Image (cartoon, rainbow, N blue to C red):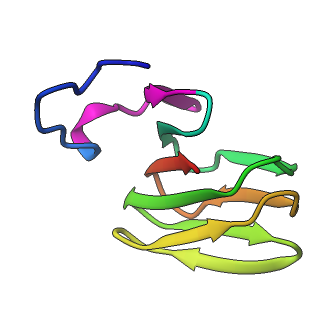
């Protein structure tokens, strides 16, 4: 298990920075059952449709993100979350620069 934030308060939004024309990821904690990963996506970046064997929750920390889950589209703004059920195809498209947290549960 990662100890990036052991015994201290962590501000997720300020814990990751953007890189031009890139997707940056930073694992905060991970074990066999769950993980928390931060992402900073520059405007215009996307993650192609794929599925995962576990449920995951996205929380937008900054910006506007379009999420496709099983052919349905949702727009998430700062502070909003969505559950991506296991084994369903999902994809992400930025509508601005986006910082997000991905919780695998």
| Residue drawn at (82%, 47%) of the image | 53
Q: Nearer the viewer, residue 31 or 29?
A: 31
| Residue drawn at (86%, 63%) of the image | 88
The N terminus - image quarter? top left
Q: Nearer the viewer, residue 57 or 42?
A: 57
Rendering coords of residue 14 (x, y %): 22, 39
Left or right, residue 80 beside residue 30: left
Q: Nearer the viewer, residue 75 or 7?
A: 7
Residue 31: tell me if it is visible: yes
Residue 88 vs 30, above or below: the answer is below
Rendering coords of residue 60 (x, y %): 43, 61
Q: Residue furthest left?
A: 8
Magenta segment: does it hold 2?
A: no
Question: How many numbered marks have been drawn onto this rendered protein structure?
Answer: 0
Residue 36 vs 44, above or below: the answer is above
Q: Residue furthest front?
A: 33
Left or right, residue 30 beside residue 17: right
Magenta segment: does it hold 17?
A: yes
Residue 82 vs 43, above or below: the answer is below
Residue 29 lies in quadrant:
top left
- Residue extent of the magenta highlight: 14-31
Rendering coords of residue 79 (x, y %): 34, 69
| Residue drawn at (53%, 42%) of the image | 41
| Residue drawn at (30%, 18%) of the image | 3
Rendering coords of residue 101 (x, y %): 45, 48
Q: Nearer the viewer, residue 5 or 26?
A: 5
Residue 62: tell me if it is visible: no
């Amino acid at each position: 298990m990662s100890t990036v934030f052991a015994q201290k308060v962590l501000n997720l939004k300020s814990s990751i920075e953007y890189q031009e024309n890139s997707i940056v990821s930073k694992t905060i904690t991970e074990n066999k059952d769950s993980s928390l990963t931060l992402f900073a996506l520059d405007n215009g970046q996307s993650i192609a449709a794929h599925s995962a064997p576990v449920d995951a929750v996205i929380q937008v920390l900054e910006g506007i993100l379009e999420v496709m889950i099983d052919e349905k589209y949702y727009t998430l703004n700062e502070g909003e979350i969505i559950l991506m059920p296991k084994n369903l195809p999902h994809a992400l498209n930025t509508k601005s620069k986006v910082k997000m947290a991905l919780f695998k549960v």
